[in-house]
Image (spheres, rainbow, N blue to C red):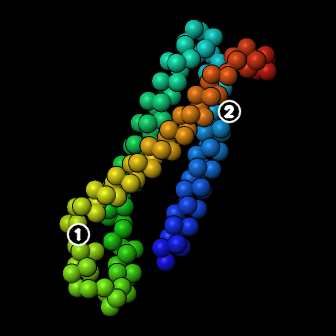
């Protein structure tokens, strides 16, 4: 069971990394002209990277916060039957711990894991963006545009 969980976690992490890479590339290709204009009016590359970092972190942290809040209300609906099925396999104390609605330590652990994962995804996205912005040449974009 532990090996299956580790394999499943690795598969999910791989999918998240792939989706992050693909969406970052799509986002950057759709914003090339905007970046070319900003670079041509004199914006430094480091400032462009910082603006993208702030925008990316605000977006990811707000989506993560909203998702965690919604999950606190939706989670018990989906896990109720699963926990009822587990009742005969775990002790009464463990069952009470799992089903208590005020399990703050589990909530904080989940919040740490979720925010850590989303911060890692944002960091990967930022690294890809930095590489693209550093090798970015606005004149090539303008020549292709017109």
Name the secondary structure under disc 1: loop
Residue hosting label 2 = 29
Q: Position of residue 17 (x, y in %)?
A: 58, 49
Q: Residue furthest bottom?
A: 88
Can the viewer see residue 92 in this picture? yes
Q: Which mark is residue 10?
A: none
User: Residue at the top extreme?
Assistant: 42
Residue 101 image label = 1
Spatial CA span between label 2 and label 1: 45 Å
Q: Toward which corner of the image does residue 69 lie, by quadrant? A: bottom left
Mark with earlier residue (2, 1): 2
Residue at (56, 53) in percent of width and height = 16
Q: At 34% from the left edge and 52% from the top edge, which residue is drawn?
A: 112
Contact (Cβ within 8 Å) of mark 2 with mark 1 = no
| Count of all numbered marks drawn on residues in the image | 2
Q: Is residue 102 above or below residue 98?
A: above
Where residue 120 appears, x then y in whole percent?
Answer: 48, 44
Residue at horizontal 40 percent and vertical 53 percent from the top: 114
Q: Quadrant of the C terminus?
A: top right
- Relative to 107, is 46 on the left or the right? right
Note whether residue 33 is visible. Answer: no
Residue 57 pos. (x, y %)? 43, 36
Is residue 48 depicted above or below 128 in this figure?
above
In the drawing, does residue 30 fall left or right of residue 68? right
Element carrying mark 2: helix
Position of 36 with respect to 100 (left or right) is right
Question: In this rendering, is residue 69 above or below 100?
Answer: above
């Amino acid at each position: 069971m532990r090996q299956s969980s580790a394999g499943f976690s690795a598969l999910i992490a791989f999918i998240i990394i792939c989706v992050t890479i693909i969406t970052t590339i799509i986002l950057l290709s759709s914003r090339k002209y905007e970046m070319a204009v900003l670079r041509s009016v004199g914006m430094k590359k480091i400032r462009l990277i910082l603006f993208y970092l702030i925008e990316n972190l605000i977006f990811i942290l707000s989506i993560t916060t909203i998702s965690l809040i919604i999950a606190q209300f939706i989670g018990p609906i989906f896990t109720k039957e699963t926990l009822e099925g587990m009742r005969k396999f775990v002790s009464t104390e463990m069952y009470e711990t799992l089903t208590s609605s005020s399990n703050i330590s589990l909530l904080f652990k989940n919040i740490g894991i979720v925010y850590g994962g989303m911060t890692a995804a944002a960091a990967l996205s930022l690294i890809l963006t930095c590489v693209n912005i550093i090798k970015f040449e606005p004149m090539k974009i303008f020549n292709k545009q017109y």
